[in-house]
Amino acid sequence: MQPARILISTSSSTRSSSLKRMDAIGGMNYAEAINQVGGLPFFAPNLSAEKAAAYIAQVDGLLLSGGVDFDPVLFNEAPHPGLGMVDEARDNFELACYHAARKKGIPILGICRGIQAINVAEGGSLIQHLPAFEDKHQHAQQNNDGSLFHTVVLEPDSKLAGAFGKTSIRTNSYHHQAIDRLGSNLKSVAKTADNTIEAVESSDGKVLGVQWHPEMSFERYPEQIAPFRLFMEAVQQYLNERIPGQVYA
């Protein structure tokens, strides 16, 4: 059986050695999760946007990973004082990968920054700094071990709720940005008590984004593999429709 090939985005265009070390550790978590659900992970450096289509042509699914903030120019806003580090090369490459993947029809999973990439690619906007809003709770937990931090409520009719088998889950939380205006073709399928969007799905079922980091938690909390299983089910469906009779791992 041939395993599905999954492209994982990285932070490799940044020059900070500390960020590169963090990316290497985080990258292994993504790879281990994809391997756990039967996929074959590949990592993509952030090259020119023109290379995106060539990368996407070689794979069966796209995982947009976590990382630094999005440049607000991409959703027509000026920088907020709380904006963190941005990465123009990564922004451009990931958005190009997203559009190439949508054109090809392969499934997409976005994690943390990745859900934000999905939303920006679909014409949505972001809250640049959650702590600037008094009605928002703490979303940037201090411990970095992936432990569960807050409750997320899932829409009962969502694929994500089906994957977890329930409508209320506990997740970790490592973000200070979040979806503001929802992009086209996306549905909010999970929120926290302060009304922050924590997950989205596309109308065609091929795009899933979660605001937390399940790759940091699934070994300790097995149910957190659910987003990856749901993503891989979509990948398998894509492959089986593309090549009838071929069975993929």
Image (tube, rainbow, N blue to C red):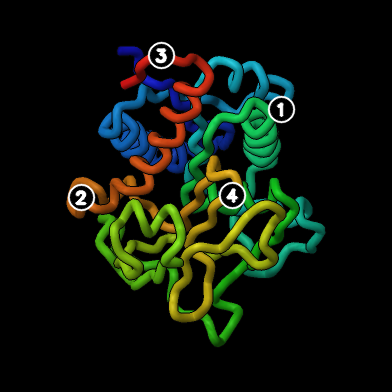
The mark that comes first in sequence, 2 or 1, is 1
Cα distance, mark 1 to mark 3? Answer: 34 Å
Cα distance, mark 2 to mark 1? Answer: 36 Å
- The answer to whether any part of residue 30 appears in the image is yes
The mark that comes first in sequence, 1 or 3, is 1
Per the image, the residue denoted by label 4 is 202
The mark that comes first in sequence, 2 or 3, is 2
Dot 3 alpha-carbon crowd within 10 angstroms: few under 14, some 14 to 19, many 20 or more: few
Cα distance, mark 2 to mark 3? Answer: 31 Å
Which secondary structure lies at badge 1?
A: helix
> As drawn, is 169 to the left or to the right of 89?
left
The mark that comes first in sequence, 4 or 1, is 1
Compared to residue 216, the image places residue 83 above or below, namely below
Q: Report the amino acid beneath label 4.
A: Ser
Q: Nearer the viewer, mark 2 or mark 4?
A: 4
Q: Nearer the viewer, mark 1 or mark 3?
A: 3
Cα distance, mark 2 to mark 4? Answer: 25 Å
Per the image, the residue denoted by label 1 is 49
- Dots 2 and 1: beta carbons under 8 Å? no
Residue closest to the eye, 136 or 19: 136
Which secondary structure lies at badge 3?
A: loop
Task: Give me the disc on residue 222.
Answer: 2
Residue closest to the eye, 198 or 165: 165
> As drawn, is 194 to the left or to the right of 47?
left
Q: Image quadrant for the C terminus?
A: top left
